[in-house]
Image (spheres, rainbow, N blue to C red):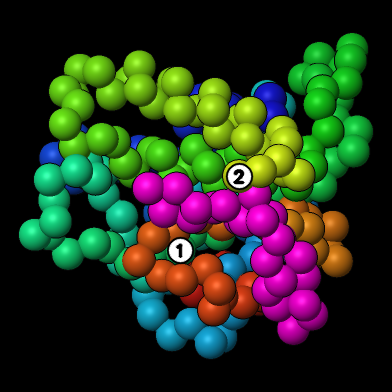
Amino acid sequence: METTSRAVAEAPAAEGGQQVPSARRTVDGYLSAPFPWYGLDEAFTGPRWLMQVGTAADGAVEHGSVGHGDEPTVRGEVGNESEPREKFAVVVTVAAQPDRRSADGTGLLEATTVSSAAWLAGVGLLSFTWPGQMDHSLRDDWLEQQTETAWTLADDLDGPPWSTLSLPVDGVPTPFHYRESEFGWVLAGTTQRGVHVGAYGRGMSAYGLGFAQIEDISTYA
């Protein structure tokens, strides 16, 4: 996806587990989107919070994420057994756009598909993780490599790492592509309202989740 957030799907946290101050908490971008946002349905009763939106070169909102549960922080996954694992699920909404014009209007960009949602979800999970025995100075190289891997996996949703999972979306059983890794889980599917939905998380089982259109995005602020 050729968007301003192509390099990092979600705003990463700072080293040491502190969140980076950014536009994550503003609702303005969400309100300007021409498509509906999705989150977990009413069966989830825990905290909900905004993350960030992704825009095209012309400033149009193309996707964004909302969080549920514990707000994740960057941490290594090795050597932290004594620390409680955060329980969270992040839902990514991507506008379905079969025809996307370049910012200068002279050409077409790659269409957004369910693979776009799968990639954004995969990179979002990576942005809060790195191997615990890795030096901080090497994390950028690791993240770049894993980002490319996430893109390759998202481009082949019928490949071996993926299985099929049926989850309710607005009360309707909907097929999702689903995979697990040592860092958590990722899934992606398409709604009947013209958007693709991706999700990632850890500590919360994906099998019990349901998704629904968010009636009032300001409730996440």
Name the dominant secondary structure of the magenta segment.
Answer: strand
Using the image, determine if residue 23 lies above or below residue 93. Answer: above
Residue type for callout 1: Ala
Using the image, determine if residue 216 lies above or below residue 43. Answer: above
Q: How far apart are marks 2 and 1 (CA)?
A: 20 Å
Using the image, determine if residue 109 lies above or below residue 197. Answer: above
Report if residue 175 is visible in the image. Answer: yes
Instruction: Specify whether residue 70 is painted magenta.
Output: no
Residue on which disc 2 sits? 161
Q: Is mark 2 on a helix, strand or loop?
A: loop
Q: Earlier in the sequence, mark 2 or mark 1?
A: 1
Residue type for callout 2: Pro
Which quadrant is home to the C terminus?
bottom left
In the rendered image, residue 15, in percent from the top left (x then y), is placed at 19, 35
Q: Say which residue appears at 70% left-offset and 61% top-offset.
A: 164
Residue extending farthest front: 160
Q: What element carries label 1?
A: strand
Q: Say which residue appears at 13% left-offset and 51% top-offset.
A: 80
> Which of these two is toward me, 107 or 90?
90
Q: How many labels does the image show?
A: 2
In the rendered image, residue 212, in percent from the top left (x then y), is placed at 67, 75
Q: Which residues lie in the magenta part?
A: 162-187
Residue on which disc 1 sits? 89
